Amino acid sequence: MRRTIIKPAHLRKGDTVGIVCPASAPFEQGDIEFTYEWLQKLGLRYKTGKHIFDSYSDMAGPDEDRLRDLHTMWADRDVQAILPLRGGNGCARLLPGLDFELIKRNPKIIIGYSDLTALINAVHQQTGLITFHGPMGGSFFRSSYSYHFFNRALMSNRPLGLIVDPIPSDLWNPRYPPPRMVLAEGRARGPLVGGCLTLIKELMGTPWELDTDGKILFLEDLREEPHTIDRILTQLLLAGKLQKAKAIILAEFVACKPGDSKRESFDLNHSVETIFRERLSRLGIPVVYGLRCGHGHDQLTLPIGVTASLEAHRGKVKLKIEESATT
């Protein structure tokens, strides 16, 4: 039985966005000026967390300070959405201290990707609140595609509908992989969940382990060697996580060719595409590869928990977000 879903209100001009850093701090403090400018173009105001420029190891301050900023924004009645500045590391460390009852009493938009995978999926599973996997404060304006879907997802109460691909910047040098490569045909309908593969693995065996049962699962990652991706997929298969999904969408796996990580690489490494075909194409569910979502230049905004449908047939892929994510 599907749990009760809570939908946040969509953003309107004049609303206030709370800017926080639950993971790592911005690399260049001056970058935040671009975020301010683009929020103003959307007609939005902003508040900043007290600790967004703090530093503690590779995180924006100690756990208790990052957590305090999150709770402060969630309790602030003047803040309608929470916009992290970047990923990096640290969100999973906050989960044991996160006040899910506070979040449930004050439903509002939260969006992020990469390390935020831990936060947005845990919040949805614990509270029923629809959350968003998409660009953060430092990246929603990096391409017209990212900006378009960020705007549509957060500033409207209509379903996103059919998902289209970015217009190619160069017809003579197409980006790999194609955005809708079919690895296994089929049809599926169910709630969307997912995010960064590494973070989904990190939550295995915890109270916030990702629930994939009956879901359309999307996965992406950055700078992981193919053999590492194979090991993570093997772990998820051994745990029955991938078999329980209704469909799998493999988004962009940026800089995941052998040696791209600048760490350990194997001389006889497969490509990630080969690993995806070998590990996932015989699960009996539709599997597609290449959706522009995650760490790439063009970033979709996908609502976590809403109903979507996927059709993959004869090399054609149709992804539709059927349900509105906001009120």
Image (spheres, helix red, strand yellow):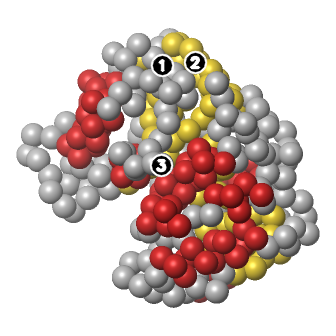
Q: In percent of the image, x 84 and y 70: which residue is there? A: 77
Q: Which residue is mark 2?
A: 188
Residue that lies at the very extreme toward the front in this rendered image: 101
Tell me where residue 215 sits by quadrant.
top right
Q: In percent of the image, x 40 and y 28: which residue is there? A: 242
Look at label 2 and name its amino acid.
Answer: Ala
Q: How far apart in space, not on screen, are marks 2 and 1 (Cα)?
A: 7 Å
Label pair 2/1, CB-CB below 8 angstroms? yes
Q: How far apart in space, not on screen, are marks 2 and 3 (Cα)?
A: 25 Å
Q: Foreground residue, 252 or 73?
A: 73
Q: Foreground residue, 300 or 298?
A: 300
Is 111 above or below relative to 90?
Answer: above
Report if residue 96 is visible in the image. yes
Tell me where residue 21 sits by quadrant.
bottom right
Residue 93 location in percent, x, y? 44, 66
Is 221 above or below relative to 181?
Answer: below
Look at label 1 and name its amino acid.
Answer: Pro
Q: Which residue is mark 1?
A: 286
**Tag shown at residue 208:** 3
Residue 101 as seen in the image, left or right of residue 286: right
* Nearer-N-terminus badge (1/3): 3
Label pair 2/3, CB-CB below 8 angstroms? no
Is 294 above or below relative to 231?
Answer: below
Report helix, strand or loop for mark 1: loop
Q: From the image, which quarter does the C terminus lie in?
A: top right
* Nearer-N-terminus badge (2/3): 2
Q: Foreground residue, 27 or 314?
A: 27
